[in-house]
Amino acid sequence: MSNVIAKETVQAAAAPGVARGAVLSVDDLYLDYGSGASANAILKGVSMNLQKGEVVSLLGPSGSGKTTLLRAVAGLESPKAGTIRIGERAVFDGARNMELPAEERNLGLVFQSYALWPHKTVFDNVAYGLKLRKMSSSEISDRVKKVLPQLGLGHLADRFPHQLSGGQQQRVAIARALVYNPPVILLDEPLSNLDAKLREEARAFLRELIIRLGLSALMVTHDQTEAMAISDRILLLNNGKIEQQGSPEQMYATPDTLFTAEFMGSNNRLPAKVLQRNGSRVTLQINDSTVHGTARGAGLGTEPATMIRLEQVRVSGTQTENAIKLPLVTCMYLGDRWECLFHPHGANDISVRAYSSRRLEPGEYWLELPEDSLWVF
């Protein structure tokens, strides 16, 4: 497919702060809802870049600003200050009071609800944006017939949305976003309407499609597993600011802050007293046992938080190093493993969850907490 926006792109020298080769650049973006003293700040100086062929996920809890950022890039929200560039073309510049409308940004957008026309066939839904651009009928037909097979929809061109499964409707929405070959595709919770089984299949399909077509994509999700599976890079937002960004491996294995560590995995928060610190090694007292952990982040606060991921806890029937002893309360079957809960009788201050390959018998167990995985913030 030819790039229909090439002739519209104004070549200019890259602006300060714009990453070289970036297909999308956001610099120091602010956005408020309301005005005056009642204004509610949603984005508080967000900066990010998307490189060609890269998939970046905007991850964060509800109200963190991730969807607002995506909508601002799409032209569906008006920021207060900052810049947004598609390639080297400015589409929003707060200092110059310049803002291009959504229809002139040539970005592909896949809505959470898919937003398909119920009275139009798959072919006509995909062709709709091209008709708005007043392309010839022959070119529209060529483009649609080329994109539909790429998403496994070639045999469904004459069906209506109500005749499709949820996964097929999702692919129609993606085809509609891709048909005019936009420089960036924006995905707003693209898998959230699918059931759990179909969601796993769609996640693999979407990642394969992105790689096969060499897409540049910005995706909003609240699901950390989805973000890690699909993305090359994750931007974790917290209260309108970027808390941390990096590859999925970096975000999961080497979090810089307690917020990142807790958001990116299933964790145990442990009540611990810091006895000593020597560099990054921290000596802790947990449940009358002395163990060692690793300090992470900028430094320990006045009330340090201690945590460990569930999969890092090792369950042993005999005494082992760097461990605490707790009685088993229950085990829950998850299919490929058991999740076991350990909790002292009559106490509410400590509770530990851990995975096991088998159902454990009642009794007390030693829970090994590897020093490198027992994080103190």
Image: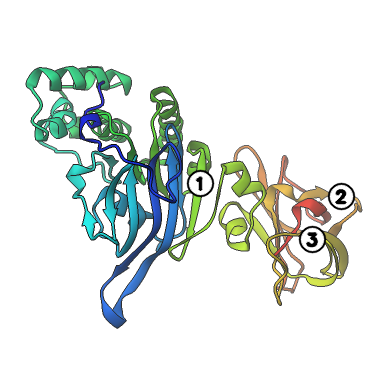
Q: Is residue 118 left or right of residue 2?
A: left
Q: How many numbered marks appear? A: 3
Residue 56 is situated, as x and y percent measured from the top left of the image, at 45, 42
- Looking at the rendered structure, the kind of residue marked 1 is Ile
Q: CA distance from mark 2 to mark 3?
A: 11 Å
Q: CA distance from mark 1 to mark 3?
A: 38 Å
- For disc 3, the neighbor class at 10 Å (few under 14, some 14 to 19, many from 20) is some
Chain-order first, disc 2 or disc 3: 2
Q: Secondary structure at mark 1?
A: strand
Q: Foreground: 361 or 65?
A: 65
Point out which mark residue 265 bears: none
* Residue at image point 51% right, 46% down: 234
Q: Foreground: 356 or 90?
A: 90
Point out which mark residue 327 bears: 3
Q: Verify CB contact (< 8 Å) between mark 2 and mark 3.
A: no
Q: Verify CB contact (< 8 Å) between mark 2 and mark 1.
A: no
- Looking at the rendered structure, the kind of residue marked 2 is Gly
Q: CA distance from mark 2 to mark 1?
A: 39 Å
Q: Is residue 161 visible?
A: yes
2 or 1: mark nearer the eye: 1
Q: Is residue 171 above or below residue 222?
A: above
Task: Write down the residue under mark 2.
Answer: 317
Q: Verify CB contact (< 8 Å) between mark 1 and mark 3.
A: no
Q: Quadrant of the N terminus?
A: top left
* Residue at image point 30% right, 65% down: 80
Chain-order first, disc 2 or disc 1: 1
- Looking at the rendered structure, the kind of residue marked 3 is Pro
- For disc 1, the neighbor class at 10 Å (few under 14, some 14 to 19, many from 20) is many
Q: Quadrant of the C terminus?
A: bottom right
Residue 87 is situated, as x and y percent measured from the top left of the image, at 34, 39
Q: Residue furthest front?
A: 13
